[in-house]
Amino acid sequence: MAPGEIRHAILDILSRIVPDEDLSNLNDSVPFRDQMELDSMDFLDIVMELRKRYRIQIPEEDYPNLISMQGTVSYLTPLMKDIPARA
């Protein structure tokens, strides 16, 4: 998957976890928690959804890489490079 496709996949996951949030104005460089009501359980749901959908294992010590969209996409790009984008 390309970075843009990964971003789209993360937006899809976020839209399911926090359905009442407006993600259209999400600033990629600002931490998710500063932009939306996202608690630690929601964050773990994101990690679990990545694992379920894409079989991506994210060690707990790497969680700080996932605090913003920019960090998440940068972290996931090498891990998901061989995963085909979903239609």
Image (spheres, helix red, strand yellow):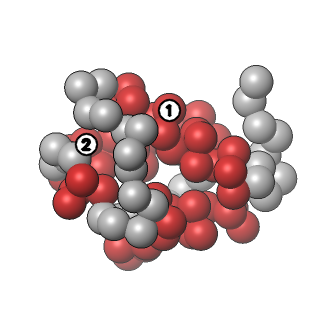
Image height of 27 relative to 47, above or below: below
Question: Regarding mark 1 in the picture, which secondary structure is present there?
Answer: helix
Residue 1 visible in the snapshot = yes
Image height of 55 relative to 18, above or below: below
Q: Which mark is residue 42?
A: 2
Find residue 40 and report its horizontal and vertical position in percent. Answer: 19, 52
Find residue 74 and report its horizontal and vertical position in percent. Answer: 59, 69
Find residue 80 and report its horizontal and vertical position in percent. Answer: 71, 55
Q: Nearer the viewer, mark 2 or mark 1?
A: 1
Name the amino acid, label 2.
Answer: Asp
Q: Residues within 10 Å of mark 1 (few under 14, many from 20)?
A: few
**First-in-chain label (2 vs 1):** 1
The residue at 24%/53% (across/down) is 35
Q: Which image quadrant: the C terminus?
A: top right
Relative placement, left or right, of 65 versus 55 is: left
Question: Regarding mark 2 in the picture, which secondary structure is present there?
Answer: helix
Find residue 6 and report its horizontal and vertical position in percent. Answer: 64, 49
- Do callouts 2 and 1 mark residues in contact (Cβ within 8 Å)? no
**Rendering quarter of residue 63:** bottom left
Q: Nearer the viewer, residue 11 or 86?
A: 11
- Number of marks in the rendered image: 2
Relative placement, left or right, of 10 versus 85 is: left
Residue 14 visible in the snapshot = no
The residue at 68%/63% (across/down) is 77
Q: Residues within 10 Å of mark 2 (few under 14, many from 20)?
A: some
Residue carrying label 1 = 12
Q: Nearer the viewer, residue 67 or 34?
A: 34
The residue at 69%/45% (across/down) is 5
Name the amino acid, label 1.
Answer: Asp
Image height of 28 relative to 8, above or below: below
The residue at 30%/25% (across/down) is 19
